[in-house]
Image (spheres, grey):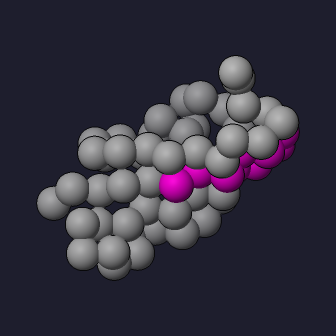
Amino acid sequence: MKRHVGIDVAQKECALCIVDNASAILFEGTCMTDPDEIAAEVDDVEKIVHESGPLSVA
């Protein structure tokens, strides 16, 4: 099953939504804005999409 992740990044917390290829929500919640915590939540995914706001690197 392919999983896709949407991440809305903020300074303290990230909002995450993980869906499968049938668009069923597998996880919806938050985690701390820390690379290790984000990686723990998004393990084994096909695609990651993030919000491109002021915290994005150009």
Vertical position of residue 48 compared to residue 30: above or below: above
Residue 3: say if magenta.
no
Q: Position of residue 48 (x, y in %)?
A: 44, 44
Magenta stretch in the rendered image: 6-14
Quarter assignment of residue 34:
top right
Q: Quick check: 28 left or right of 1?
A: right
Toward the front, the furthest residue is 58
Q: Residue at x 29, y 56 (%)?
A: 3
Q: Quick check: 11 left or right of 7?
A: right
Q: Main secondary structure of the magenta part?
A: strand
Residue 45 seen: yes
Q: Position of residue 17 (x, y in %)?
A: 51, 63
Residue 41 seen: no
Q: How many marks?
A: 0
Q: Position of residue 9 (x, y in %)?
A: 71, 45
Q: Residue at x 36, y 55 (%)?
A: 4
Q: Quick check: 49 left or right of 34?
A: left
Vertical position of residue 30 compared to residue 10: above or below: below
Quarter assignment of residue 58:
top right
Toward the top, the furthest residue is 58
Vertical position of residue 29 compared to residue 42: above or below: below
Q: Position of residue 8 (x, y in %)?
A: 67, 52
Vertical position of residue 32 compared to residue 2: above or below: above
In the picture, the quarter occupied by the N terminus is: bottom left
Q: Residue at x 37, y 66 (%)?
A: 19
Q: Residue at x 35, y 45 (%)?
A: 47
